[in-house]
Amino acid sequence: MATMEKTCTLLVHFDKGTPSLSSEIKEHLEGHDVEAKVDAMKKAIMLLLNGETIPTLFITIVRYVLPSEDHTIQKLLLLYLEIIDKTDSRGKVLPEMILICQNLRNNLQHPNEYIRGVTLRFLSRLMEAELIEPLIPSVLANLEHRHAFVRRNAILAINAICKLPQGEQLIPDAAEYIEKVLHQEQDLSAKRNAFLMLFNHAQERAVNYLLSHLDSVATWGDTLQMVVLELIRKVCRTNPAMKGKYIKIIVSLLSSQHTAVMYESAGTLVSLSSAPTAIRAAANTYCQLLQTQSDNNVKLIVLDRLQELKASYREIMVEVIMDVLRALSSPNLDIRKKTLDIAMDLTTLRNIDEVVMSLKKEVVKTQNAELEKNGEYRQMLVQAIHSCALKFPEVASTVVHLLMDFLGDSNVASAIDVVCFVREIIQTNSNLRESIMARLVDTFYQIRSSRVATCALWIIGEYSLTVSEVEAGISVIKQSLGELPFYTESEEGEVVDTAVSKGPSTPKAAPPQYASTASSKRPAILADGTYATQSAAAASVAPFTSAVVGSSVNLRSTLLMGDFFLGAVVASTLTKLMLRYEEIENNKEAVNKAEAEILLYMVSMLRLGQSSALSHPIDDDAYDRITLCIRVLSYKDQLMKTVWLKNCRQSFAMMIKDKLSREMEEKKAKAQDSYAQPDDLIDFYHLKRSKGMSQMELEDQVQDDLIRATGEVSKVGDSKKLNKVLQLTGFSDPVYAEAYVTVHQYDIVLDVTILNRTTETLQNLCLELATMGDLKLVERPQNYALAPNTSKQIRANIKVSSTETGIIFGNIVYETSSVLDRNVVVLNDIHIDIMDYISPASCADVAFRNMWAEFEWENKHAFPGSNKYHHSRRSGVLAAYCGFHQHEVSHSTICYGR
């Protein structure tokens, strides 16, 4: 089978120029100018790489280039010999190739070590046994050369020769030669190559050498140690009973000076042992790499390994949570996010105080304006603290007041997370209610976001329970709304904010064009996915905006910009405060006065929405809500009081309870099911001999017994995989094929198993695939030789460019010695439907809206001959569902008109 494979070469574009280029190359090669010969050889190699054939050039090179002593020419000669075809159509070596054997033998005996080394490297890529056989004595002689460069390349050449089908016949004693070299060699690279050769072709000798040098493994070089780890993995997979001998080697390599060796040692230790001591050592090694490595990619890879350990060994990973949190010092947001995700799953009652303290320090650091992306990082920290407070309510008191300082954060998403956190904490921690309410009233003037203000107003309306709290709530809302009326008209008919006109410095009135400009309308999408029309009166609001920016009347500025949803929330909050004030305040005169002022504010908001101050009227929903609030205060009813003062908070409490229960159910669903067979073997640990065994080996035996007894290792994965196997050919076909399809984001991987059911060797067997739809085959599978009744695994990669259904079809082509023509087996079609590989998931409202904006959900398409736009809504939904970016999702799906 190896003879059918070709060495992969790099295709470089080369301008072939005029037809006389071939004769020009030949002329330069026959000359005596060294530089001209070098240039001619380079041109010849370029022509061959680009598919040109120059049949007469080989003899010219043999006559005029082979005798050259120039090192550059000799190197180019070897490159030329590597890429030319050395066999005919029947696989036989061309007769003229014998001419180069004498030259190669001379190069292997050349006094210059560079010539010897590059020639040996060329032999590593030579696949023709007829050409290699006469060179074997010279190759073996180079194993004892004085220069390490020659010795290491000689070992690589022997390793490559042994991989050939005739390798054992060419060098029957290769393992003995290499083992002798391994014991005597001092050069690190040569020693690594020798050990690798024994690992590939004489594994028992490699194991014996390793066991005889256990004490010196830690002093070997990093390249040799990496091969040792690979050998240990291979040996332990075939013979698990030998695992105890090698664990000591792996543990010693955990403290290696080379980071690559440390990483591989930790991964090998986890794959071989489930003992707590082993997992703890691997976790500590990963944490050490996390702190010492500056490369962000390395940190992300190490965090992935820690996440895998967390999924299987959470109790052990809890011990290193503070070491993991040190990765937050990295400025990279991806590293910080992944670190917080790991840490949040490792919080317990023992470490929650330390974790929250560390998160608080990070929040304080984000106040430094010089750091980049502080707002996004602060939002992550707020979400992490929120998660901690929900799981451990006793820590909420230590963080809630610190976070409330960020209610006026310029990053709206971060401020929304803070106010939502405050809302849940005040409901779940009644002992913090008074301090939170006092803090919220003090910081309310800092809020600049309408969405944050609505949630803060709801908290004030629901949790102001004492007279002082109610009065403080009404007072802060009145101060934010400012004095009434909201606007007046000047003598020239211009609209002026009364809060500005009565101030000490009145700005110049807005130009008349502000009031005359019409409002603009654009489509908007509500949280439930339905469409609505959103109007914006940016022009007429300009004088209000310029006048009130930076003032403390934040609610007033938002109302004057036309946000009457906020006005409805203000009215609802004042109604709740007023109803509660009537219940707890005995001074009726104060109650009546407060009620009259509140009603005046509500009426003023209605007048503002119906006046010409804004270019569009108040929306119907806000108008109905404010009107309802006026009626509730005017016609007091006991049932309405119960609805406004009790039922709303009860509904919120039920929502939090359902949320927590849903999270618990999701965690249970993610837990791996255990399956154990009744006839599985169970070893009794106490009946085993433990003399001479290390603590890690003893723990490993206990863990293995527990895994077998509890059936922790699930066998469901293999059965699910078998359900997705697609049969490509019939059972009566000479070649049977089946495929397993894996879809991962933009890639489709086909793992095709091909079985030769005939009694003949199949030559040049090739899996030919083609696609239909928005699928693209990345590479064409190569040809293989398949012995009778043997199978071959072939992997094909396909790129996905849309969510459209695609079809993969093709056939298997092969040749046999008895039939000259090529045989073809047609494969069944494979239908790729992306919807089969999508799993539904829940998404928070804030995250949903952020993705909505990020993926540009409503992309407009202009159709020829029409001035209307259509919106590909399905492609956007799939984009968020699959994690695709919008520009990589096809827009040829069903379009919905506005």
Image (cartoon, rainbow, N blue to C red):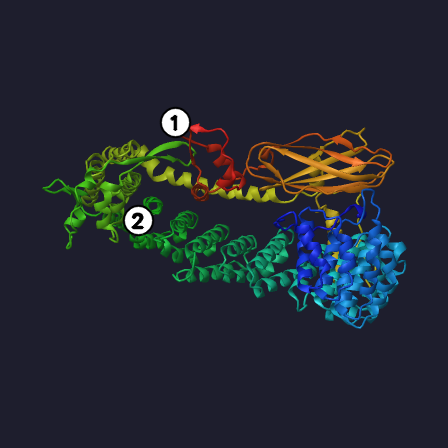
Direction from residue 85 to residue 859 in the image, left or right = left
Residue marked by disc 1 = 866
> Which amino acid type is marked by label 1?
Ser
x and y, in percent, of residue 507 in the image: 17, 51
Residue 565 at x, y = what percent? Answer: 31, 39
Read off the residue under disc 2.
466
| Mark linked to residue 641 | none
Q: Residues within 10 Å of mark 2 (few under 14, many from 20)?
A: some
Residue 39 visible in the current orientation? yes
Spot the residue most to the left.
Answer: 491
Work out how far the residue at label 2 is from the one at label 1, CA to CA, in angstroms: 63 Å
Image side of residue 93 versus residue 867, left or right: right
Q: Nearer the viewer, mark 2 or mark 1?
A: 1
Label located before the other in sequence (2 or 1): 2
| In the foreground, 757 or 314 | 757
User: In terms of secondary structure, where does tag 2 sit?
Assistant: loop
Q: Label 1, secondary structure: give it.
A: loop
Residue 86, placed above or below residue 831: below
**Residue 445 to residue 38: above or below:** above
**Closer to us: 336 or 319:** 336
Residue 677, can we see it?
no
Quarter holding residue 183: bottom right
Q: Is residue 575 left or right of residue 419?
A: left
Q: Quadrant of the N terminus?
A: top right
Give the quadrant of residue 338.
bottom right
Residue 357 left/right relative to 486: right
The residue shown at (72%, 47%) is 53
Number of on-image labels: 2
Which amino acid lies under the numbered mark 2 shown in the image of this protein? Answer: Thr
Q: Quadrant of residue 518?
A: top left
Quadrant where the C terminus is found in the figure:
top left
The answer to whether 115 is drawn above or below residue 707 in the figure is: below
